[in-house]
Each structure stands twice: as structure tokens, then as C-alpha cells.
Amino acid sequence: MQINQLKEELKQHILLMDGAMGTYFNYLHPEDGEVELANLTHPEWIEEIHFEYIRNGARIIRTNTFAINHTMFSDETYENAIVAAIECANRAVFKANMQDIIYIAGSIGPIRMEPDHDRTDLLAEYKKICDCMLSHGIRIFVLETFSDVQLAKSIATYIKQSCKEHYASETFLQAQFSVNRMGYTLYGQSLDTLIKETEDCSYIDGFGLNCGIGAAHMNTLLEKAVFNKDIYLSVLPNAGYEQGLHGRHFLINNMNYYASAMETLLSKGVNLIGGCCGTTPAHIKSLATMLQTHQQPVSKETGMDHSDSDVLPAHNKFIEKLNQGEPVYVVEIDSPFNGNATKFLSGAKQLVDNDVDLITISDSPMAKARADAFQMGNYIAAQTGAHVMPHICCRDRNLIGLRSSMLGAHINGMRDMLIITGDPVTRDSRSTITGVFDMNSIRLMEYVRNMNEELFADDPFYYGGALNYAGVNIDSIANRMQKKMDAGCSYFLTQPVFSDSDIERIKELKAMTNAKIIVGLMPLVSHKNAMYMKNEMPGINVPDDIINQYYPEMSREEATDIAIRICVSIGEKLKGHVDGFYLMTPFNRVDIINAIICQLRQN
């Protein structure tokens, strides 16, 4: 009954939600830590904040559960904190004794995704949160500050289905997203995509924006947004933008400006308004006063065509060759570790002369700094006309840096990337160097896929992934490959192959996934080099029958001949089973790589 009444009210009136809990709590109790902990330590404080918002006009209050997850609470206190938050909200509503219904919504915020996790890992925790809320009477949910619309859809689906199955009752779910001033989430999903995906999900009742931006920028973004459906729309902007001064952070706050900007937002067809970071009961009071003369929501513009562009993607000769079943040859050359690029450029020229399909440049492998892969890719492309593919790893750049690099690369004509998670920072460097790892390779692939859909539909990036084929559980390896392909991965480059068992593993993975696999070949150019690869490179299996072909006193020429012969022999065993070869250049010796390629082409 309450859900039907809420929906009817939202159609007839613009309802007022509460304002910020966290920033207001920190203003009132600056020395008392995270607001969610106060559910257990000082529940009377939380109850009083809820009561203040109700007294100043809020008709919907959100439980103090935004950040209740494993990052803050142990398993023993997890559910206790959620239950305590719901009880605080219930007591505040009882205390207010209002004639109008005060609705209580369960607030669910984003959980930080660790680099080696994916949506499946997070969804189990969200289900735990939802189950606890449902079992304690919550039927209205607000997903707040989300950046991933697919995750929001999964949570919404679970809530709706679970509530019907176990409680035979309806729920109401408002999905709210955080975007930057350009209208993109942290994962690169645009406002148009968020609207389209939300409208396509029957389990989501309303769409909204909160946090990240102020009312003025939210207004600018919604001016350009058109909806296909008359979905419930909520707007909960920040009071302003956070500023730093003398080591302290505060929000620029002009109450009159905020109220004026919020009034402008009402013309966008808003059904529900409230406040996010920096807002207080005073802000909510000003909105309540404004709503006395703006009670009924205006109609939204509908009918925007979200259909895909009719523009055909630009040609990519490497991808076309790969998809046509022709064997491709990809060669990796090391970017300079100093300011001298003479050998690097010379090697690139020799490879171009040999018509290699792609020159790839690693992104500071083993966490040792080398010249930037994107910039060196642009350098040799300009100097030689080479088709280049830089590696891009998640270790050294945050999402801002990653996006900036990719935008610059696209402007410079680069269309190919190898996306990897990246080697961790070595233990001896951790005191001075930190790994960023905002995301792992799969999530970065999803991010680039979003960029392709939003920005580069007619001329997209194509990207490959690394295949670490070694491991006990081949099903797990194949499953990770499938996740990468689902994220838009076009092909895989493997670690170097040396043994017959590795060859059989590659064949098996190819049969299981039907993926495009480009097999790694690495010439071992000396006995010392062979021993190093066998004993000091994890995940690479160099069998004794290969090691035994080398000896310490052998000449450079003898070692070169053996290296070429071994690589060609491995390549011949894999021909017809893989889609090409990925050759790693040892010590800038491009002559060896070209010799291997020539023999493989001839045979």
C-alpha cells in the first residue's frame, strides 16, 4: 500500500528528500569519525539528524547506511549497524508524529571494487545488505552515487525479485548516479547511457543524479537529456564544490544561490528533490519553502532516439587481417629507459621494412620506469608509419590519467591497445612508490568499451588482453578470458611458449573459448639468458630440453641459431591452431625477430 501511495504522490507532487547525513554529521561532531559507526555508538545523534530533516520539510529520509560494507564493518557488526540505522530512522519518524506519511528509504552506496574483483564479487555483498534491509521492513531503496549502471541494474533486479519471492510485497527503487561536469561517471558511462540503461530495466522505478556536481552543472546536463519514458526523476546535488584551504576541506555554500539553481531544475520534470554533500536541514527548509509554489512536477520531454549510429567503423587493417584468419605478426620492442631512442627507432624501422603487422610497446614492465608507451608509440608512428599498439596498465595512473592518455592517443591516430592490470610495485620500492590500481584489466576494458560507444563509435579503439595460460584450473583461465571478451577484448597475447605442454594448453584454451590467440615467442639468445628465464621469471616454463641446447662457452652466433630454430619449431607446431605470433625482442636484437618471422612465413 505504501509503495502505491508513494508512486501516486510522486506523480501528483514534487516530494522532498532529506539532505546530507555524512557531511552534516561531521559538522556537528567533527571528532567522532565515520557517521555510520554512530548507529552503534551514538544512535541518538543519528535520530536527531533525521528528526531535523523531517521537521524542516523532508518527506523521505534515507537510512544512515550509505557506507555500511566490509570496508568499515566486521562480519559481527555488519547487520547490527544496518538494523540500528533503520531503528534510528523509525524513532525519528515516530517522534515527528507528522500527519503526512514520512517515507523511509534504505540507502545503499557504492562499495569500492578491488583490482582483482568484478561485479560478481560485489553483488554477493550487496545481496547481503539488501537481505538485511528487506528483513527489517525496508521497501523503498535508493542506490546512491553509483558509477556503474550494470551493477545498479543487477542490484535492482535482486531486490525486486527477492522481495516478491520472500515477502510477497512490492518495492520502490530509485537509482542515482554520480557524474562529472561533462556528464560521465567514473567508469566512463555517459548520462545518455545511464538514462537508456535505466529505462530498459523494469526493476528500476526512478532515475536520478546525486553528488559529484552542484545544482548549476546538474541543470546544464539535464537540459540536454531527453527521456524515452516518464520515469521518476530525482536530483540531489551537492551544496557546492569542495575547496581546500590551509589543509582543511570545506564546501563553498551560498544558500540563496543553491535554492535558485534548484528551482531551475524543477523545469526538467523532477519528481523528487533533496540534497547531497554539504547540504543541511537549512537547505531542506529552503527547498520546502520553494516547493510551496512548485508542487506539481512538469512533464518531461520524451522520445529521444537512442538508436545506434549508422556510421560504419573506420578500417583497422590489423583487426581485419586477424578476423579474416590470416596469421598476424606482432613484435614487442622495449621503450628506452634513458633519453636515447636511437636503437628503439632503428629497431622499429627494421620491423616496418619487414612488414610486421603491429609493433607493441610495454608499459614499464616489472614496475621499472621506461619512456611512456603511448608517447613512444606516437613517436615511431610519426617517424616510420608503423602500426603501433602500446600496452596500458592500471598500476601507474588513476582513472583521470588513464582517460587523458587514451584521449590523447586517439587524437594522435592510435587505435590499438593491449590492456593489462600490470606488474605490482616491487617490495623494495613500496616505501616511496605506490601502485594506483583504480581498476583491473577487465574493468578498464569495460571503461574503454564505454568510451568507444560514447565518443568513438565511428572510429573505435581495438584492444587485446594478456593471456596467462599457466595454472592448475583451466576452466578458471577460460572463464577469465570470456569475461575479457564480454568486455570487448578482440584478441589475446600470451606469455612466451617453450614446452609441448604449454602448446597443448594453448590449443585447449582456443577450443574452449574460440578466442583469437596470438602466441608469445621469445628467443633465448645465450645460456645466461636461458637460465634467467627458467629460474627468475614466474609463470614462464622453460623445459630442460631447451636449456640443454645452450652452454656457457657457446658463441653469439651459435646461440642465435639455436634461438631462431627453437622459436620456429614452436611456431610450426602451433600453426593452424592459433591466430598469429607475438615476438618479444631480446636486447634490441630485431635481426633475430625478423629472421624468425621470415622463416615462419616461408614454411
Image (cartoon, rainbow, N blue to C red):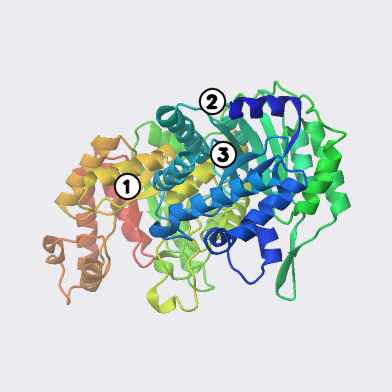
Q: Which residue is mark 3?
A: 141
Q: Position of residue 37 (x, y in %)?
A: 54, 62
Label 1: element kind: strand
Judging depth in this view, the residue of 109 and 194 nearest the camera is 109
C-alpha span from label 1 to label 2: 46 Å
Label 2: element kind: loop
Name of the residue lying farthest toward the top: 303
Mark 1–mark 2 CB contact (< 8 Å): no
Q: Position of residue 56 (x, y in %)?
A: 78, 47
Q: Which mark is residue 581?
A: 1
Inspect the image, locate mark 3, and give the three-letter code of the amino acid beneath it: Phe
Label whose residue precedes the other's in the sequence (1 or 3): 3
Q: Which mark is residue 84?
A: none
Q: Which mark is residue 202?
A: 2
C-alpha span from label 3 to label 2: 15 Å
Marks 3 and 2: which is nearer the front?
A: 3
Marks 1 and 3: which is nearer the front?
A: 3
Mark 3 residue crowding within 10 angstroms, few (<14) / some (14–19) / many (20+)? many
| Location of residue 45 by image quarter | bottom right
In the rendered view, does 34 fall on the left or right side of 502? right
Label 3: element kind: strand
In the rendered view, does 458 fall on the left or right side of 593? right
Q: Residue at x 85, y 56 (%)?
A: 254
Q: Position of residue 143 (x, y in %)?
A: 57, 42
Inspect the image, locate mark 1, and give the three-letter code of the amino acid beneath it: Phe
